[in-house]
Amino acid sequence: MLDLLIHNATLPDGRSHMSVAVQGGRITEVTQGLTPEAAQAAEVVDAGGMLLSSPFVDAHFHMDATLSLGLPRLNQSGTLLEGIALWGELKPHLTFDALVNRALAYCDWAVANGLLAIRSHVDTSDPSMLAVEALLAVKKKVAPYIDLQLVAFPQDGVLRSKGGVDNLKKALSLGVDVVGGIPHFERTMADGAASVKLLCELAAEQGKLVDMHCDESDDPLSRHVETLAFETNRLGLHGRVTGSHLTSMHSMDNYYVSKLLPLMAEAQLSVVSNPLINITLQGRHDTYPKRRGMTRVPEIMAAGMAVAFGQDCCMDPWYSMGSGDMLEVASMGLHVAQMTSQPAMQQCFDAVTTNPARILHLEGYGLEKGCQADLVLLQAQNPIEAIRLKATRLKVWRRGALVAQTPARTVTLTLPGRPATTSFLHIK
Ligand code: FE2
């Protein structure tokens, strides 16, 4: 007897009339032939031909800052640097309970949106480890429904701030999973490069993954990603290192990039681009034309690297918008990168599902026999329509158990001279 049978589903790879069988929290079968008549299941769900996907994964977020919008004041210039200064003003007022409550509220939004795995950076600059302790408590609390991976993030610069290295090491010893960094925020290019070397060595020593905020600027000479790739190769950290943002690549000289991309590919770097944030925070020193500031996503994908689109911020010192909806993130990425061919739009869906799952090294992620039964049923017929409509998450399952459901979106039209109709506005 199965715990759950979902039938008549369309999968992201285009296979239709598919059935997914679940038992003991794992997928036991993905097949076309399994009907409710043929299989005994405690619960049967007819997907009605809609898209059944593995859950959304956010490879880049700041859960210690989320939902703090307006505290202690709003970001007037809307710039990255004022955001960092504002976060510094807020830090002395943070409390453990407030941090936990805001993070848990965001996690509720995430589950409702079918977002069941998040990599969050946590600021390690404060020697009290308040934010670290709070997010470690959140990680434990949400574990039944969200995989929360934490990155030790020295927001004030690991070399620039007093005690930066010790604080970061302390966070790792408390159980933070990944080594972070922010080389472009160190005082000099040399210090930035030194921070990358030091942090990669630390990760190699401790067997940790690496994910650095890297070159989050419009300065084409901000080239710390080169050092990140070099150190990855030198230390044998292939496939374990992520460069987040890489916005300076947008402004780099094409010849230099033609030399950089093979080095990054050799290191098997992963890349996280954050389209909502990059399009709003970058290019702020430009008049017109204004640069978009997002990294070269299609070119990095074409070079064989895993690229994810991250949310980064939601209602915090850097960004007043956001809702934990990874389809909104994918939509912005698609537009900014001009990824409008059919395969490229499909890749944008992968950039918020399978690619970040790979970057996080998530165990048992996927729509195959033996994978965790973490699933999202969307009110869309395929991944491209899901992005276009920011499709309703009809049902969300975690380990085979229903954790969220939203009624299907319909509209009732009462137009003059026509009978009233209730339907969902999509093309059959
Ligand atoms: Fe970030």
Image (cartoon, rainbow, N blue to C red):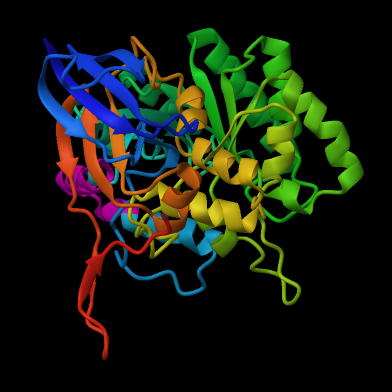
Point 28% across, 26% down: residue: 374
Name which quarter of the figure residue 196 lies in: top right
Between residues 186 and 340, which one lies in front from this camera angle? 340
Name which quarter of the figure residue 232 lies in: top right
Q: Please provide the residue range marked out in magenta.
A: 91-111
Point 41% across, 57% down: residue: 389
Q: Residue furthest left?
A: 42
Point 29% across, 39% down: residue: 377
- Would residue 128 be seen by someone viewing this image from the given angle? no
Above or below for 383 versus 39 = below
Q: Residue furthest bottom?
A: 416
- Would residue 152 be seen by someone viewing this image from the given angle? yes
Between residues 392 and 381, which one lies in front from this camera angle? 381
Left or right relative to 370: residue 330: right
Query: Residue 15, position in %: x, y?
Result: 45, 29
Between residues 211 and 35, which one lies in front from this camera angle? 35
Determine if the magenta segment contains residue 95: yes
Q: Residue furthest right?
A: 255
Viewport quadrant of the N terminus: top left
Point 48% across, 37% down: residue: 154
Above or below for 254 versus 212 = below
Query: Residue 22, position in %: x, y?
Result: 22, 17
Determine if the magenta segment contains residue 188: no
Viewport quadrant of the C terminus: bottom left
Left or right relative to 237: residue 12: left
Main SS, magenta region, reads helix
